[in-house]
Image: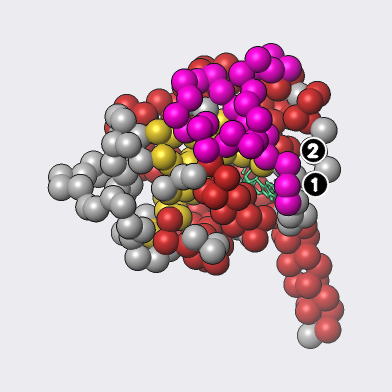
Amino acid sequence: MSFFHAGPAPRAFGPRPGGLRDGLDLQPGMKVGLFGGSFNPAHDGHAHVAETALRRLGLDRVVWLVSPQNPLKDARDSAPLVQRMASARAAAASAASGPAMIVSDFETRVGTQWTVDTLRALTARHPGVRFVWLMGSDNLATFHRWRGWTDIMRMMPMAVIARPGSELDSRTAPAAARFSAARVPAAKGRVLPYLEAPAWTYITAPLNPRSSTALRARAKAEAGAAGRNA
Ligand SMILES: Nc1ncnc2c1ncn2[C@@H]1O[C@H](COP(=O)(O)OP(=O)(O)OP(=O)(O)O)[C@@H](O)[C@H]1O
Ligand SMILES: O=C(O)c1ccc[n+]([C@@H]2O[C@H](COP(=O)([O-])O)[C@@H](O)[C@H]2O)c1
């Protein structure tokens, strides 16, 4: 089984008979955050993003979409999917709302790599689910380079969670400028899942400084030191 509920199913929605074979038990009317990432490895910054979005947007679930490979990143730096799935499961389980977190290899199952294709597949398979795309503010800076990014903006609402070092992007990023009229205040986050796209918000606080790059660098340095001391 390659999907994971970090705990017992949350209340409000029961099991649906004859669910689709994508490992996601989502039901019409649910408000669901889609949190794509490399998770190479996952860390408490990811749990912070998922938890913040869940609470501030009033979501029922957050699906952690473990990417087969970010098309804009070097594949040589990526740990195998199975390792990144395990890491995402541990981080999702550590979130205060662990039972509402789902870790999924949906993109590997359906064979999508570009987010626009993934979101098309998800919305087609789950009619009536109110999806919101979630990402950190560093990704807002480069969002205009993503394939079909304006289609993504028009497909579902989006919430951007501030990340240290890229907070200013909420004002200067080309995507933010292009869709400035569709921005809603973070204080109205709970209505975001009900809004017709394009609609997006920027959630500024609190901040979490963790990054996978820093964790990989630390692991490499520790392995080097262990090797020298052996
Ligand atoms: N500390 C954080 N605060 C806010 N958003 C974050 C944080 N860490 C990761 N994110 C967001 O989580 C998503 C997945 O990130 P990813 O798995 O690439 O982790 P990362 O730490 O950014 O990795 P890397 O350092 O390898 O680029 C992205 O949308 C990213 O912006
Ligand atoms: O589709 C694209 O053009 C695209 C370009 C860069 C990143 N993404 C997606 O953005 C999400 C975050 O990626 P990452 O590597 O920053 O964790 C993940 O789901 C990627 O597949 C998507």
Q: Residues within 10 Å of mark 2 (few under 14, many from 20)?
A: many
- Is 33 inside the magenta-drawn segment? no
Assess mark 2: CB under 8 A from ligand 1? no
Using the image as rendered, state which of residue 1 and residue 177 is in the foreground: 177
Q: Residues within 10 Å of mark 1 (few under 14, many from 20)?
A: some
Using the image as rendered, state which of residue 159 and residue 63 is in the foreground: 159
Assess mark 1: CB under 8 A from ligand 1? yes
Quadrant in the picture for residue 7: bottom left
- Compared with residue 159, is residue 26 higher up or lower down, i.e. above or below? below
- Residue type at mark 2 is Glu
Quadrant in the picture for residue 159: top right
Task: Residue 87 in the image: state x and y as whole percent.
Answer: 54, 62
Q: Secondary structure at mark 2?
A: loop
Using the image as rendered, state which of residue 84 and residue 157 is in the foreground: 157
Name the residue rendered at 64%, 37% in the picture.
187
Q: Which residue is mark 2?
A: 167
Left or right: 136 with respect to 12?
Answer: right
Tell me whether the residue at label 1 lies in contact with that at label 2, contact meaning CB atoms closer than 8 angstroms: yes
Task: Residue 85 in the image: state x and y as whole percent.
Answer: 49, 57
Q: Which residue is mark 1?
A: 164
Name the image quarter holding the C terminus. Answer: bottom right
| Span colored in magenta | 177-206
Quadrant in the picture for residue 189: top right
- Compared with residue 77, is residue 27 higher up or lower down, i.e. above or below? above
CA–CA distance in space, label 1 to label 2: 6 Å
Left or right: 93 with respect to 76?
Answer: left
Question: Which residue is the extreme one toward the left?
Answer: 17
Task: Residue 69 in the image: state x and y as whole percent.
Answer: 55, 41
Split into quadrants, the picture shows ligand 2 in the one at top right
Question: Which residue is the extreme one toward the front?
Answer: 187
